[in-house]
Amino acid sequence: MDLLPRVLRPRAEQLSRDVEMVLAGLRGERAPPWLARDGARYGAPLVPNPQRSHDARALAQILAVEIEASDAVSLILRWPEAFPAPRPGQFITLELPEVDEGLRRTYSISSDCRAPERVSITVRRVANGRASTWLNREARAGMELRVTRPAGRFGEALETSEGAVVMVAGGSGITPLMAMLRSGLGDPGSPRAVTLIYANRSAESTIFGAELRAMAAAPESALRLIEVLEPSHGRLDAACFASLVDRHAALAEALGQRSTQVLVCGPPPMMGGVVEQLRGRGVDDEQIHLEHFTAGRTRAEPNPERGRAWSVEFVEGPDGPATTVVVQPGQSLLDAGLDANINLPYSCAMGGCGACMSTLEEGSVAMDEPNCLRPRERAEGRVLTCVGRPTSPCRLRITTGS
Ligand code: FES
């Protein structure tokens, strides 16, 4: 990693985390859900985290709500002036105290980023999903939502390359890819050949189906659309992906080129099967870019101690001030810290990016698994505050937003 140019390191870091997460899931590996420290001072300084987002949040007004499928809507937002324009492939995090205090959910931007004053996110209603159900049923034009700055590097590979593009989307995993297509990649006459493999449970639940078909059918379109519907093709897994490559010569040819970039976003089993096939066909890890769109995580194992509130000392930076907070049963370290107005870094809020990584100096923390922490980072006492809950009194050293 150190040999790479500085500008490429964050991307390589995130790619490496993503691939490790997917492969660990395929191997059925589970990290121990507990991390305990005995109170010794740990000398290793916090590694500067390239994924750390600013902590700025702002209100974004809903300008319109558009129905995209039987169970999905797009919310068109007036983009906060204080925020930078989003880039294709980025996401924002919504805070939804209307639904539940401390509830946060991350959604990819789905709109054309060349028109940054109106930004859309697309939300599929998931079973028992409090946030997605509320956004589908209750969100109305005129409401204001608290949102974080845009974050994520999923689309960066396309900004620094010129070859063909292969996209693989499952369900609402289409949203970040749609932003890329709408932002110029899918324009007629676009110089890059794009193949989109798009898997869905049914035609009725296919988000952006009509727009994508029109995009692919337009004169001089560079987009080749391959739809995979469960009733007729089965689930998009490794075997299904292999048969698609066998049947579509242009897809096989694109995957055989070192300049091709492959972007994958969808449910973890689908992503695992696709990555397995890509690697088996000699596609280099540097060509593969993954975005996890669903938490799909299991809570840390039940523990009698989790039923208690614990005091946690948050220490800001190497010599910064310390604030002691009582973390309620089931509450994450991130939620408790933000509620106490501590300037905690975070981005995805679901254990996938590493932006909230802090160092546990004393006590024990349970984390939801899987998450993107590496074995080395666990051994060094790093924890993710967004999916971490104390199981004893703790002291955490954090990096703060600038
Ligand atoms: S905010 Fe992304 S891992 Fe915690």
Image (spheres, helix red, strand yellow):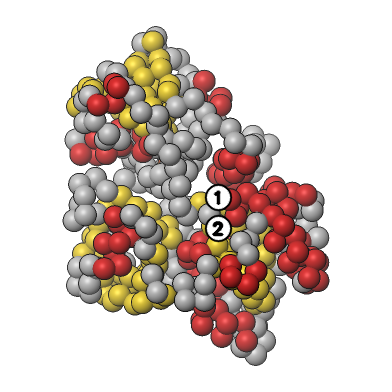
Question: From where the camera sits, is residue 212 visible?
Answer: yes
Q: Which residue is mark 1?
A: 268
Residue 172: assigned label = none
Q: Report which quarter residue 331 is drawn in.
A: top left
Camera-side residue of 83 and 91: 91
Which quarter shows the N terminus?
top right
> Circle 2: is it few (<14), some (14-19), or many (20+) Cα within 10 Å?
many
Q: Secondary structure at mark 2?
A: strand
Q: Amino acid at mark 1?
A: Pro
> How far apart are labels 1 and 2 at the CA level?
9 Å
Camera-side residue of 84 and 75: 75
Which quarter shows the C terminus?
top left
Q: Which residue is mark 2?
A: 265
Residue 58 at x, y percent in the picture? 25, 57
Which residue is found at the position 52% from the left and 67% from the top? Answer: 201
Residue 46 at x, y percent in the picture? 45, 27
Which residue is found at the position 64% from the left and 75% from the top? Answer: 225
Q: Is residue 389 left or right of residue 91?
A: left
Q: Report which quarter residue 126 is drawn in.
A: bottom left
Q: Amino acid at mark 2?
A: Cys
> Circle 1: is it few (<14), some (14-19), or many (20+) Cα within 10 Å?
many
Residue 286 at x, y percent in the picture? 69, 49
Q: Report which quarter residue 384 is drawn in.
A: top left
Camera-side residue of 303 and 180: 303
